[in-house]
């Protein structure tokens, strides 16, 4: 027996409203392709370019707890801000973040990353220096690669010492697309 | 030591069992009442989900929750009529009255009458208790009653 869509939606809404979820997620359309977006009661947990929930759900379950449910309304804020960003109506995200699972140094680096302005780039080495470890460019590269919330924390703005794009967790094409969207000189 | 079966993300669990749960609730409650019961079932499951020790028998677990929700739903919707006020309160169970009343009957007839009218057992159940058959139990009961009537008439 198929569960009618409105009944299904009612349950997903009330589960989130009742505060019973460790993480709520949805798949959001974007110019970069579908994005899996997940949030806890503390804030945005995850943006993934791999929108096939299977793998990501297991990961979310281990990170946040087993009560992971698709609940579109629960990530309405994230969806709205991403839409605005992709329509060039937003330069800065105003979303609470849940960075559990990130190391202490990682959080420091991501904090510095958040300060790299829209449309600008910085190098891995510069970011390492700003986080207090000038020689940790390689570690910063790893932290960028594992950034749990790309786009919102703009790891696409971090480039190699020569200005080359170097790498991106979501693929170099996406990195280039984001920088062009922001009008950065690349 | 064996690794316990991991608890899947709730989404996976919900997708796997929602159809069967809805089917069960519709059979027990009808289409209208099944919708609310469906919500209630999965909200109850969600409330308990992070306290599960392992991911085994989740199908049986959620069907049990659904059955309980169905029972609660039926109970809630049954009209509640206050029992009429009794003229005088009599808290003595019927079998105690019968015990005195049937004093002096032949043992089998006495047991049959008490079991039938004191404990409200069926003749099959009485037969099982007395080690006889239903016909014999019925006969013992009615001859006991006849004897009591005759005794009262005198």
Image (cartoon, rainbow, N blue to C red):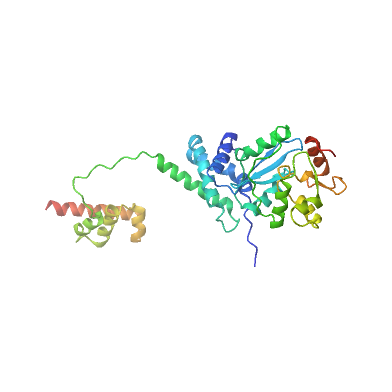
Picture quadrant where residue A26 is located = top right
- A7 vs A53: above or below: above
Q: Nearer the viewer, residue A55 or A2?
A: A55
Residue B89: % across, % down:
20, 50
Q: Does residue B145 appear in this view?
A: yes
Residue A151: % across, % down:
73, 42
Left or right, residue A104 beside residue B106: right
Q: Does residue B23 appear in this view?
A: no
Q: Outermost residue toward the left? A: B154
Left or right, residue B56 beside residue A165: left
Picture quadrant where residue B15 is located = top right
Q: Nearer the viewer, residue B101 or B108?
A: B101
Q: Nearer the viewer, residue B71 or A115?
A: A115
Residue A171: % across, % down:
81, 44
- B66 vs A181: above or below: below
- A3 vs B120: above or below: above
Q: Nearer the viewer, residue A181 or B63?
A: A181
Q: Residue at point 22% right, 59% down?
A: B99
Left or right, residue B46 beside residue A53: left
Q: Residue at point 77% right, 36% down?
A: A182
Left or right, residue A31 beside residue B15: right
């Amino acid at each position: 027996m198929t569960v009618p869509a409105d009944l299904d939606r009612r349950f997903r809404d009330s589960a989130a409203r009742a505060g019973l979820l460790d993480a709520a997620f949805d798949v959001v359309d974007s110019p970069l392709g579908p994005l899996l977006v997940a949030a806890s009661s503390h804030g945005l947990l995850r943006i993934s370019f791999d929108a096939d929930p299977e793998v990501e759900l297991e990961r979310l379950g281990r990170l946040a707890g087993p009560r992971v449910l698709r609940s579109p309304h629960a990530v309405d804020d994230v969806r709205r801000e991403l839409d605005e960003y992709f329509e060039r109506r937003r330069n800065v995200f105003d979303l609470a973040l849940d960075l559990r699972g990130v190391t202490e140094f990682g959080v420091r680096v991501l904090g510095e990353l958040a300060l790299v302005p829209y449309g600008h780039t910085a190098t891995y080495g510069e970011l390492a220096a700003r986080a207090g470890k000038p020689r940790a460019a390689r570690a910063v590269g790893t932290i960028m690669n594992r950034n749990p919330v790309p786009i919102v924390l703009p790891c696409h703005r971090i480039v190699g010492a020569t200005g080359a794009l170097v790498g991106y967790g979501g693929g170099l094409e996406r990195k280039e697309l984001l920088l062009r969207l922001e009008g950065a000189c690349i | 030591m064996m690794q316990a079966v991991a608890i899947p993300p709730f989404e996976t669990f919900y997708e796997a069992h929602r159809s069967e749960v809805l089917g069960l609730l519709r059979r027990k409650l009808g289409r209208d009442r099944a919708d609310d019961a469906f919500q209630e079932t999965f909200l109850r499951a969600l409330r308990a989900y992070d306290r599960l020790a392992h991911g085994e028998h989740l199908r049986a677990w959620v069907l049990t929750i659904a059955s309980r929700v169905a029972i609660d739903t039926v109970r809630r919707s049954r009209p509640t009529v206050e029992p009429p006020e009794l003229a005088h309160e009599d808290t003595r169970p019927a079998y105690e009255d019968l015990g005195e009343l049937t004093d002096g009957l032949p043992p089998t007839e006495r047991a049959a009458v008490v079991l039938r009218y004191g404990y409200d057992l069926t003749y099959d159940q009485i037969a099982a208790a007395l080690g006889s058959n239903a016909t014999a139990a019925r006969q013992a009961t009615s001859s006991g009653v006849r004897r009591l009537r005759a005794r009262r008439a005198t």
